[in-house]
Image (cartoon, grey):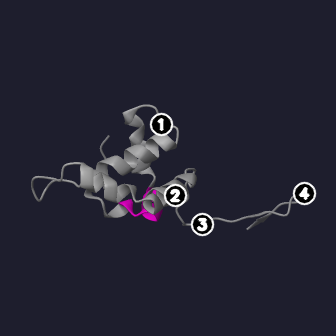
Amino acid sequence: MIQQGILPYKLEITKEEITPRSGLVLYAEVLQAMGIREEVERYFPQPGSNRGYSPWLFIQPVLMMLYGGGRHIEEIREIRDDFAVRKLVGMNKSRRFRHSGTG
């Protein structure tokens, strides 16, 4: 632990996952409270096979990316690679967002 001399803050090393996008967790909660997932699942087509994905697995990360300031679809990688946000939002269960080590 490092004791600061001027400000009353203490710094420690942690093994916990941290994220600069913690505000997206609140946004995901708002989406859930508004019932957006249910609306997306009702109006978007469902997968045609057991290997398909539900519409929400595509829509949620795009909404989060746009709300987080993303302007290009490539920026969705920031959501994919942010394990802390995905864990808090419950996106870890998604097969689509498992990290494969490729770009």
Left-right relation of 39 to 68? left
Which numbered disc, 2 or 1, marks the residue that appears first in the sequence? 2
What residue type is disc 3 on? Thr
Whole-angstrom CA distance, mark 4 to mark 1, is: 37 Å
Which numbered disc, 2 or 3, marks the residue that appears first in the sequence? 3
x, y (%) of residue 8?
A: 85, 64
Mark 2 or 4: the one toward you: 2
Circles 2 and 4, Cβ within 8 Å, touching? The answer is no
Whole-angstrom CA distance, mark 2 to mark 3, is: 21 Å
Which numbered disc, 3 or 4, marks the residue that appears first in the sequence? 4
How packed mark 2 is, by other alpha carbons closer than 10 Å (few <14, some 14-19, many 20 or more), is some
The residue identified by callout 1 is 70
Q: Is residue 97 something that shows in the picture?
A: no
Could you tell me which secondary element the residue under label 1 belongs to? loop
Circles 3 and 4, Cβ within 8 Å, touching? The answer is no
How packed mark 3 is, by other alpha carbons closer than 10 Å (few <14, some 14-19, many 20 or more), is few
Residue at 25 percent across and 50 percent down: it is 43
Residue at 55 percent across and 66 percent down: it is 15
Mark 1 or 3: the one toward you: 1
Which numbered disc, 4 or 1, marks the residue that appears first in the sequence? 4
Circles 2 and 1, Cβ within 8 Å, touching? The answer is no
The residue identified by callout 4 is 6
What residue type is disc 2 on? Val
Report how many numbered discs are placed on residues in the image: 4
x, y (%) of residue 96?
A: 27, 53
x, y (%) of residue 88?
A: 47, 64
Q: Quick one: 22 or 63, which is closer to the camera?
A: 63
The residue identified by callout 3 is 14
Give the magenta part as a residue range.
83-91
